[in-house]
Image (cartoon, grey):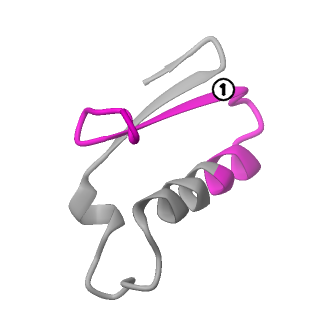
Amino acid sequence: MLRDGTLYLNLSKDMILTDDSPQYGLDDMILAVGNAVLFNFPRIKQLFIFVDGQQPGS
């Protein structure tokens, strides 16, 4: 959902942690996705990423 330059992005844990990427942890994958989104979509000023509806690390 995008509202006033803030994107709320909910990802599936299965999508981020695949069998093909065992060398990367969840935090690294979330950081990579976040950086890619912010770089490619300059209208987005703030990004909140959720994994399976939960904030990572909480």
Q: Secondary structure at mark 1?
A: strand
- Which stretch appears magenta? 35-58
Q: Which residue is mark 1?
A: 46
Looking at numbered disc 1 in the image, what kind of residue is underneath it?
Answer: Gln
Q: Quadrant of the C terminus?
A: top left
Image quarter of residue 55: top left
Q: Quadrant of the N terminus?
A: top left
Image coordinates for residue 2, horizontal then vertical, percent: 51, 22
49, 28: nearer the viewer: 28
Image coordinates for residue 35, horizontal then vertical, percent: 67, 53
Image coordinates for residue 46, horizontal then vertical, percent: 66, 26
Residue count near mark 1 (Cα–Cα under 10 Å), binned few <14, some 14–19, many ≥20: some
Q: Is residue 53 highlighted in magenta?
A: yes
Residue drawn at (68%, 30%) of the image: 44
Q: Is residue 16 above or below residue 44?
A: below
Image coordinates for residue 42, horizontal then vertical, percent: 77, 38
- Locate residue 24 relative to residue 20 in the image: left or right: right
